[in-house]
Amino acid sequence: MLDRAEVRDLFSIYRASEDESERTELRAKLVDQYIGLVEFLARRFRNRGEPLEDLVQVGTIGLLKAIDRFDLEREVEFSTYATPTVVGELKRHFRDKGWAVRVPRRLQELHLELSKTVSNLGQELGRSPTVAEIAKSAGTTEESVLEGLEIAQAYNFTSLDAPIDSDDAGSTSFADQLGAEDDQLENLEYRAALAPEMAKLPEREREILYLRFFKGLTQSEIADRLGISQMHVSRLLNRTLIRLREALRED
């Protein structure tokens, strides 16, 4: 682990560098320095039905954002600055998973704001507020109110096992009518773009990616198979994903 002065020097070099490969390497070092903070924060959300490893990956996205936004002139430790960003990314992850269909972030936030407004107005007026009253209280247009209220439908879940006919014996469910998604076709473009970068990776990093994302092994299982620590697997995985993400952006 680096001390405080060494970390500040690392941030200074990262900020000043214009070489993408050097910046990627420096960013990976900063991630290694603070991945323990991400794991600590991710554990606070581990009892919500998501694997801890996936939460660490989500939290790492927040860490990367904090690294890119951190200003050395701030009189604050980076860990203090990064914590709300990482926690915010984790909360966003759970909030986004609560929608039945993918809804743009702007509309999600509008819906949440309008829900509070409707609740407050309902208490004040003793009745359901009109669209005009909601728009006036929220400081927006009636069209936006209608749009925000309409997407509340995305929160209404119907069980896939619910029958779609009235015959209880051998009735057909929604799930029976769904087709299968072709994951290979959906990921074809990404695979083609990443193939050259994958070929450049060291053999161990390629094996870790294969075991994690193609075989579905946990980081603990990968560590046991490779004879290294789970922490080492986590760091190698994060570093590799950062490199591949940078390659996609450049492409």
Image (cartoon, rainbow, N blue to C red):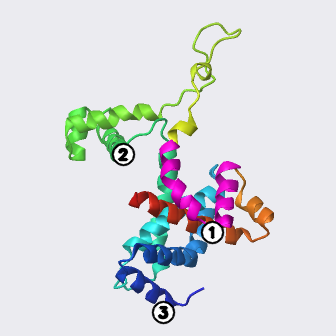
Question: Which is more N-terminal, label 1 or label 3?
Answer: 3
Q: Secondary structure at mark 1?
A: helix
Q: Nearer the viewer, mark 3 or mark 2?
A: 3
Mark 2 and mark 1: Cα distance apart in space: 43 Å
Q: Secondary structure at mark 3?
A: helix
Please name the residue that numbered disc 2 is placed on.
Answer: 116
Is 207 placed left or right of 97 in the picture?
Answer: right
Question: Which is more N-terminal, label 1 or label 2?
Answer: 2
Is residue 126 at least partly visible in the picture?
Answer: no
Residue at x 49%, y 56% (from the top left corner): 91
Residue at x 44%, y 87% (from the top left corner): 8
Q: Nearer the viewer, mark 2 or mark 1?
A: 1
Q: Amino acid at mark 1?
A: Leu
The quarter of the picture where residue 162 lies is top right
Q: Which residues are magenta?
A: 188-215
Please tell me whether the stretch drawn in magenta is mainly helix, strand or loop: helix
Q: Amino acid at mark 3?
A: Ala
Q: Nearer the viewer, residue 89 or 33?
A: 33
Q: Which mark is residue 5?
A: 3
- Could you say where residue 22 lies in the image, as x and y percent from the top left? 45, 78
Q: Nearer the viewer, mark 3 or mark 1?
A: 1
Q: Residues within 10 Å of mark 1 (few under 14, many from 20)?
A: some
Q: Are marks 3 and 2 in contact (CB under 8 Å)?
A: no
Q: Nearer the viewer, residue 230 or 83?
A: 230
Q: Quadrant of the N terminus?
A: bottom right
Q: Residues within 10 Å of mark 2 (few under 14, many from 20)?
A: few
Residue at x 45%, y 63% (from the top left corner): 246
Please name the residue that numbered disc 1 is placed on.
Answer: 236
Question: Which is more N-terminal, label 2 or label 3?
Answer: 3
Q: Residues within 10 Å of mark 3 (few under 14, many from 20)?
A: few
